[in-house]
Image (cartoon, rainbow, N blue to C red):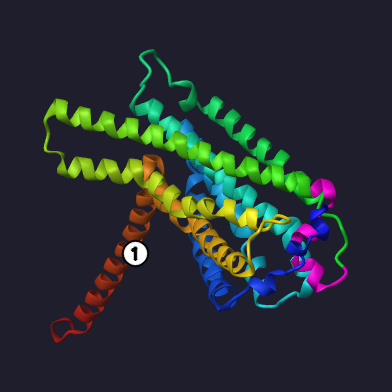
């Protein structure tokens, strides 16, 4: 059966909408758009002024780029949910904006996995020879970053090109699957399966790397017999912040994505109430995934010493400049007061 003609695709998104998806989520997306733009713009301003002297810095810079690309797709979603732009805006979202959103999201997932492997090599498997290990090498890190972007582009570009059926009206424009050619439907299924598999594989990598890192840190502290309270807390903040952001933002969405995708398939057996509930869960957990753009700058600050030191230096310079101006103003006021006192007349 052709899924484009199935009754499961005939019910449009508005039928599954609710006050949560149409009134609550749009302003929340706008809020994280402005907050994320400020935070990541500032992070990019700092990051791209520091040299790429390690693999970690290369991976983090690429995470900033992925977040900025994801942010570029944010305004379209709340605009469509608020009824702006007409049905043609829904076509733009289906063909371009959604593809950009998901591609940049999985780029962030990939770079989190690479960062975890780099930390694992640095802490658990430090190289005994001179020079950094391959994952810590800048040329290797750049090559892996290009490979990651190329893989995601190869996966995403057909989703753009094969979403080429004309949309005659708003009802058709709201159903992205009806804008896809038959080959586009098959590619969408394959790319969805690939993306979900990519997430779960990255999750296994993170679980392995951070369990090994935690064990190594614990053994190191036991061997030197230090007071571990402050040291352990600082190490945990810096090393495990990425894992916390990964689990908070991406795990809930991928836990409900598989049943939601199955509910959209022909003859899935899901009733309208089940599809409505899965749609609400998908939209809510997708917002958590989007919230990643506001939490990643915290990871940069805690994990990357180069970023942290550059940020603190700039803040100190600004604070020092303001303090100098305040001292100068105070001295000027004192001199004017002294010049106007009776003893100096």
Foreground of the two, 99 or 137: 99
The image quadrant that residue 173 belongs to is: bottom right
Q: In what quadrant of the picture does the C terminus appear?
A: bottom left
Q: Position of residue 158 (x, y in %)?
A: 78, 45
Identify which residue is drawn at 19% across, 78% down: 338
Q: Is residue 174 magenta?
A: yes
Q: Is residue 63 above or below residue 117?
A: below
Q: Is residue 315 above or below residue 114?
A: below
The image quadrant that residue 190 belongs to is: top right
Q: Is residue 257 above or below residue 236?
A: below
Write the start and end of the magenta stretch as one range.
Answer: 168-184
SS class of the residue under badge 1?
helix
How would you rate the neighbour count of disc 1 (Cα within 10 Å): few for under 14, some for 14-19, many for 20 or more?
A: few
Identify which residue is drawn at 58% across, 30% down: 144
Majority SS type along the magenta span: helix
Q: Is residue 118 above or below residue 254?
A: above
Q: Would residue 202 be found to the left or right of residue 185 on screen?
A: left
Q: Is residue 79 magenta?
A: no
Q: Position of residue 116 (x, y in %)?
A: 43, 35
Q: Would residue 200 be found to the left or right of residue 75 on screen?
A: left
Q: Position of residue 146 (x, y in %)?
A: 63, 34
Q: Position of residue 128 (x, y in %)?
A: 35, 14
* Residue linked to disc 1: 322
Identify which residue is drawn at 15% across, 29% down: 222
């Amino acid at each position: 059966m052709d899924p484009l003609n199935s009754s499961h695709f005939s019910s449009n998104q508005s039928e599954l909408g609710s006050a949560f998806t149409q009134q609550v989520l749009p302003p929340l997306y706008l809020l994280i758009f402005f907050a994320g733009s400020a935070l990541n713009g500032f992070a990019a301003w700092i990051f791209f002024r520091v040299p790429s002297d390690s693999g970690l810095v290369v991976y983090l810079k690429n995470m900033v780029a992925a977040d900025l690309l994801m942010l570029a797709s944010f305004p379209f979603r709340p605009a469509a949910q608020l009824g702006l732009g007409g049905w043609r805006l829904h076509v733009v979202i289906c063909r371009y904006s959604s593809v950009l959103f998901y591609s940049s999201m999985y780029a962030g997932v990939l770079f989190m996995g690479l960062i975890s492997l780099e930390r694992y090599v640095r802490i658990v498997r430090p190289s005994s020879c001179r020079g950094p290990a391959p994952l810590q090498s800048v040329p290797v890190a750049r090559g892996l970053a290009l490979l990651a972007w190329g893989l995601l582009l190869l996966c995403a570009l057909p989703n753009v090109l094969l979403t080429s059926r004309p949309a005659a009206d708003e009802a058709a424009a709201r159903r992205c699957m009806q804008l896809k050619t038959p080959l586009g439907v098959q590619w969408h299924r394959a790319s969805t399966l690939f993306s979900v598999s990519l997430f779960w594989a990255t999750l296994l990598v993170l679980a392995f790397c951070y369990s090994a890192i935690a064990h190594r840190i614990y053994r190191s502290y036991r061997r030197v017999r230090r007071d571990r309270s402050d040291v352990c807390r600082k190490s945990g903040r810096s090393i495990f912040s990425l894992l916390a952001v990964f689990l908070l933002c991406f795990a809930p969405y991928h836990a409900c994505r598989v049943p939601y995708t199955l509910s959209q398939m022909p003859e899935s057996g899901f009733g309208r109430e089940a599809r409505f509930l899965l749609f609400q869960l998908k939209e809510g957990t997708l917002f958590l995934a989007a919230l990643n753009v506001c939490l990643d700058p915290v990871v940069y600050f805690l994990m990357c010493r180069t970023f942290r030191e550059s940020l603190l230096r700039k803040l100190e310079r600004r604070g020092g400049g303001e303090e100098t101006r305040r001292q100068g103003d105070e001295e000027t006021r004192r001199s004017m007061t002294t010049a106007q006192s009776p003893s100096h007349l």
